[in-house]
Amino acid sequence: MKFSDINNSDIILIKRIGQYVKAYKLKFLLALLCIFFGTTVGLTQPILWGRILANLFNKNFNQVSINILYITIIYILQALVSFLQSYLTIYIINNLAYDIKCDMYRKILDLPINAFDNMRVGDFISRLHGDVSTIANTITNQFLSIIIDIFKVIFIGIVVFRINIYLAVIVIATFPFSYFVFLKYGKILKEKNKEIAKANDDYFSDMQESISGIREIKGLGIKNERFNTFMINSIKLKNKIININIISNLSQILSQSINIISQILIMLTGGYLISRNLLSIEYFVAFSSYSNQFSDSLMNITKINSYIQQIMVSLKRIFDIMDNLSYSKQEFGNKNIEHINGDIKFANVNFKYDKNNKLILRNISFKIPKNSKIAIVGSSGVGKTTILNLILRFYEPLSGEIFIDGINIKEFDEESLRRYIAIVKQQPYLFSGTIKENLLIVNRNASDEDIRRVCKAAYLHDYIMSLPKKYDSIVGENGINLSGGQKQRLAIARALLRDAKIILFDEATSELDNESQEYIKKSITKISENHTVVIVTHRLSSIIDMVDKIMIIDNGEICGIGTHDMLLNSNKIYRRLYEAEAYNFNKSERQFNMAYN
């Protein structure tokens, strides 16, 4: 590969990965020494085999035995050194991959929420697993081998010139042709590797979505559709891998063809020199072996082009994540707040998700006193959930300020902000494991009594105690073994165990049956005695008799705050929402009665 093909950004990426390699430089050096030793010792074998053949022709069996003994000793030494080298290589590969993955995963967890809005989970998995493995293996295996091949080319080159200059010239003369081959295919391989990386992202994303959504796939009867999508992505990936291997193999075939021509010329020239007594059989045998090693090493060096192209693609994809995927890094303050009361204030807040989109929130201002319950209602898409996301600092306002206890939330350090604010979503995410493990994940120091207390507050304790394994019952992947209401109550218990002073509910009661809804309402009423509760919902009937005040959002603006009775009498938008819900309820009831009467 021409050095001009490596630009400044490539050099920066190489230096950055070099920092990871630096941590294992002694083991790298020892592995390199093992390879050098094994290679150097192995280079004596052609001479010894040549001597054995020559002594056999001369019937000097004593020398044959001595040389066989030497070869045996060399083999034992090589085996021991090879074992040590294999151990070091495996150690370096796995630790190098571990270090990079840890830094990548930490960066993924620190990425702003909008990064996950725009990038698929499978893309992250593909980079975290596939690209890291590519880099670790290439650096440890291929590049170490290339260093040894360069050493062999230099050392063997000197030896073959010492044996016979005419034969050496034939070997050396083939190098420009091999060099031309890898120059020609270098850029093609780089582009093909980029295409494979993109196809891998599609493949992993589709597979992750299908496995995660297997219940929906079966329930909707779309197994064939999802299988067809899997087939399309698999075929695309398969064809691209086949294509790049064909190109790579073609370049190798061309190099091998050059090598075979070289070997034929060596055999013809060597035979002529032996017939004229200008070269002994012993040295010709040694030269033949050396020339093969020389050609193989030279051909391996030509592969460095494809290795570099492959690793540069993977490095770019990895450090894109390390550098926040071009997203602005979210900055937190340095205030470690020991306690909050739970007052919330929005002051002239404007927000939109994308600079090209219209405003989602327009000049929003309101106050929520501590230990109060407020519901935010409105039609879909008016900005209700956005308010919760801004309180959590998942997104930043375009302008305006948000305060908690009179402190701008930008001044909170991340630990304080996350410690005192929790959210319970319509579909809370639960981790695979037991009920107890899902609670302890937010507070490792919590006692069994603490766990029982928060579960009682969330009206979940009695249900848990009815299970055979009680708090050690498995919830399944994302809580599949629990109902929607039970999952939400477990999420409430989790928020309480973390001692979150502000608890946000995002459509938490919208899709529940009456019994589950009643449990959630009891939980919210109980916890609001010592917590600030903000509920986002489009289902007015679920919050009318539960909250202190209702705030109406319409078209990104606040168009009313008050109690249910006050708003019903004085606010047209609220009355329209209430009447629409009542009409839909009555319509559903009439349809039900007609169907079963």
Image (cartoon, rainbow, N blue to C red):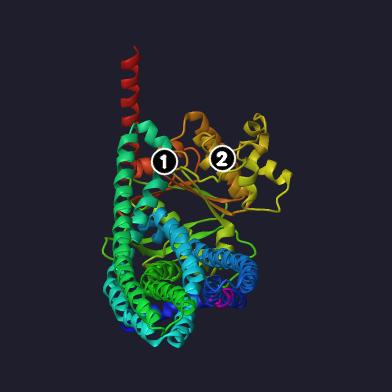
Q: Which residue is mark 2?
A: 489
Residue at the spot of label 1: 213
The structure residue drawn at horizontal position 36% and vertical position 85%, both measured from the top left corner, is 166
Query: Residue 545 got which mark?
Result: none
Q: Position of residue 516 (x, y in %)?
A: 52, 32
Q: Are marks 1 and 2 in contact (CB under 8 Å)?
A: no
Q: Residue at x 33, y 26 (%)?
A: 588
Q: Residues within 10 Å of mark 1 (few under 14, many from 20)?
A: few
User: Is residue 250 shown left or right of residue 326?
Assistant: left
Image quadrant of residue 153? bottom left
Q: Please provide the residue range marked out in magenta.
A: 38-44
Q: Residue 348: where, in percent of width, then height?
A: 38, 65
The spot of residue 403 in percent (x, y) is 50, 65
Is disc 2 surrounded by few (<14), some (14 to 19) or many (20+) residues within 10 Å? many
Q: Is residue 261 left or right of residue 155?
A: left
**Mark 1 or mark 2: whose residue is earlier in sequence:** 1
